[in-house]
Amino acid sequence: MKAVILAAGKGTRMRPLTFTRPKHMLPVAGKPILEHIISFLRSGGINEVVMVIGSESEFITEYFGDGSRFDVKIEYAEQRKPLGLAHAVSVASPLLKGEERFIAVLGDVLFKLNLKDMLTFHGKREAKATIAISEAADPTPFGVVKVVDGFRVERLVEKPKVPPSNFIIAGLYIFENEFWDCIKDLKPSWRGEYEITDAIQLMVDRGYPVYGYLTKKWWKDTGRPTDLLEASQKFLSELSDFYVLGEVQKNVEIRGPVQIGRETVIYEGAKIFGPTVIGERCEVGPGCIIGPNVEIGNDVKLVENVELQNTIVMSRTLISNNVRITDSVIGENCKIGPSVRACGNSKVFGVVIGDNSTIGPGISFSPGSMLGPNSSIRLRWEEADAEG
């Protein structure tokens, strides 16, 4: 059996981070979202994947290649125009010939549910389609499912003003070949897209047995920066492989689950609190306090007395001395000047900074601030002083 990963979306809600990369390649606990999805599929016994990608997906194909590094076989199908999820699945159909059953999963949703259990549920009911669903206090932003006895699906509605239930679609599906009969008869929605919910509703209307698999396990649609931070914290909290491969100087305090990559140096007086992941060839300077819930990419330099909590710092970024950042996402190849402050909380992120940006000394960000890629910001008095 094969799985189709739908990874062609633009990720507009995740801007500014997705101006320079696909949202599916954003890091969570040191790995791209797509890598976590592949691991999830492998946990269910799936080792063949069709990845549906967009027109600008070199990041994805260069990173994953044929999948051999990840113990799976990966084939690619291109969705050239954003014509909906059902259309994205249909793009993969030539690579699914001979498959009586397949899995489809959204490329920006992370799961902790038991995939083997869901497959067993599907098989026992002789279902033609099974949808992973969960309960939500406010289902209006989601696709909603109305079920009857035994969780047989009766109706699906996309983002309803008046939801027929509190059961929402989690972005994971199991389909039998009957799905293709409905795809070919599908009409575009009011958005001009071929909706996967419409395809499944057509299966229901034609009498095919369609079921909802209710999960109470954690899952997350990583659509926004706050979702990315929450997902990172969840995966960091479950770290089971702790290691220090770099150099740790004297008088360094390390507590809790921590991963430190090769050629990274933790300088005297630094403190690292897990769960925290630090990549390769990094420098964590004297007096730095890192963690908990921090992930740092490769080739990152933290100069001195840097404090980071609940934060993602991507590769090749420099953070100068006396900086405090919490609940934030810092893009690749950024330069953060001395005495910068960016602090958020559980309800609002501190700052999201796009790639290749420069932040001058003394800048203090209001919670919820966002800065696009290739930005430069500094205080006015500093500009006047620089001009002489």
Image (spheres, grey):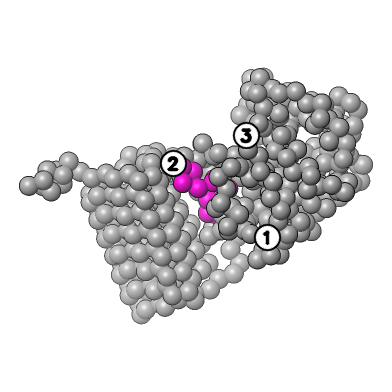
Q: Where's residue 60, x and y in %?
A: 59, 52
Say which element carries label 3. Answer: loop
Residue 131: numbered disc: none
The magenta segment: 18-28
- x 90%, y 32%: residue: 208
Frontmost of labels 2 and 3 is 3
Kind of residue sitting beneath label 2 = Pro
Nearest to viewer (mark 2 / mark 1) = 1
Residue 189 location (% of width, % of height): 69, 22
Mark yes or no: residue 121 visible: no
Q: CA distance from mark 2 to mark 3?
A: 22 Å
Q: Residue at x 83, y 49 (%)?
A: 119
Find residue 81 and name its label.
3
Q: Give the percent coordinates (x, y) of residue 67.
A: 68, 61
Query: Relative to residue 269, is residue 195 depicted above or below?
Result: above
Please state which of residues 96 and 41 is positioned toward the viewer in this rendering: 96
- Label 2 belongs to which residue? 16
Q: Amino acid at mark 1?
A: Asp
Residue that numbered label 1 is attached to: 66
Label 2, residues with CA under 10 Å away: few <14, some 14-19, many ≥20: many
Question: Relative to the observer, which residue lies in front, 268 or 194?
Answer: 194
